[in-house]
Image (cartoon, helix red, strand yellow):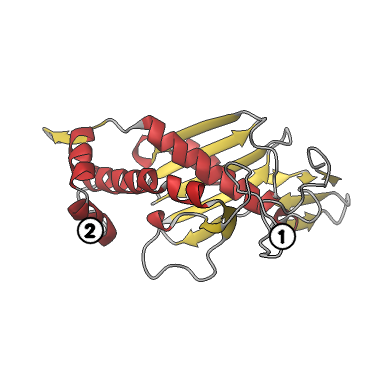
Amino acid sequence: MEQRKRLGGNSGAGYYTSWEKSKDNGCIYCGSVATTREHIPSKAFLIEPYPENLATIPACFECNNGYSEDEKYLSCFLDVLRSQVYADYHQQEQTIVRLEKDEKLHKTLKEQIEKKDGKVYYNPDEERMLRILFKLARCHAGFEFDHINFDDVKAKIWYEFAFNISDEVMLGFNEIPEMDKAPEVGSRGVFVPFIAQNVKTGEVMALAFWNVVQDEQYRYQVYLNSEGQITVKLVIFEFLYCEVVFE
């Protein structure tokens, strides 16, 4: 199996994924010196009790706190929309509490999600949504593959809600992909995939299983696609499905 080569060499290995107070680490978002650790995914998408040993990645204070409002917005939007689409679903307690405390957000969601004559109409703030989806994908890619070059690459983002996804597309999205190229030596992605070998041909492949952070709340998958591009899939509340390809 071919090994993926780190862009720019190995000089930046660990800059975004290790955490040592004795040395500088880079903020996953802006690259400046990190002073905090960012949970990935944000607790905004999880419920209590939170998973133990939730993954973290270095971030500066400004960036760590700069996404909070948009994360709260996306979490509440998804939960409210889900409660309107599925009659037997009730909003999570954390959503109810957040909306009680944030009248502005409550009003915004009432304007963006409306049910008339049994049909649900929705109009999310796509700029805020894409900002968080890209942020989450960037963190997962950084954590799993210790990737150090986000600013010089383009990202292609696809997302859809569960009720709009056909069975065929859903099946393809949830499949376990095979990687014929391994991540960089030293990255977490080297150890996480399941490595399989064909006993007849000797061919080696890596299978990228889903990382379930919390059942029914959040899961993600990071792998190298057939073109060697880092690909991140994530599912929030089993309701929003997203794929980000770093080109």
Q: Residues within 10 Å of mark 1 (few under 14, many from 20)?
A: few
**Residue 7 numbered mark, or none:** none
The quadrant holding residue 9 is top right
Which is more toward the observer, 138 or 87? Answer: 138
Q: Is residue 2 above or below residue 58?
A: above
Callout 1 amino acid: Lys
Between the C-alphas of marks 1 and 2, the distance is 40 Å
**Residue 165 is at least partly visible in this image:** no
Which is more toward the observer, 61 or 144? Answer: 61
**Residue at left offset 77%, top offset 56%:** 196
Asked which secondary structure carries label 2, the reply is helix
Q: Earlier in the sequence, mark 1 or mark 2?
A: 1
Callout 2 amino acid: Val
Q: Relative to 66, is 13 on the left or the right?
A: right
- Numbered-mark total: 2
The percent coordinates of residue 15 (x first, y second) are 71, 51
**Residue 97 numbered mark, or none:** 2
Disc 1 target residue: 23
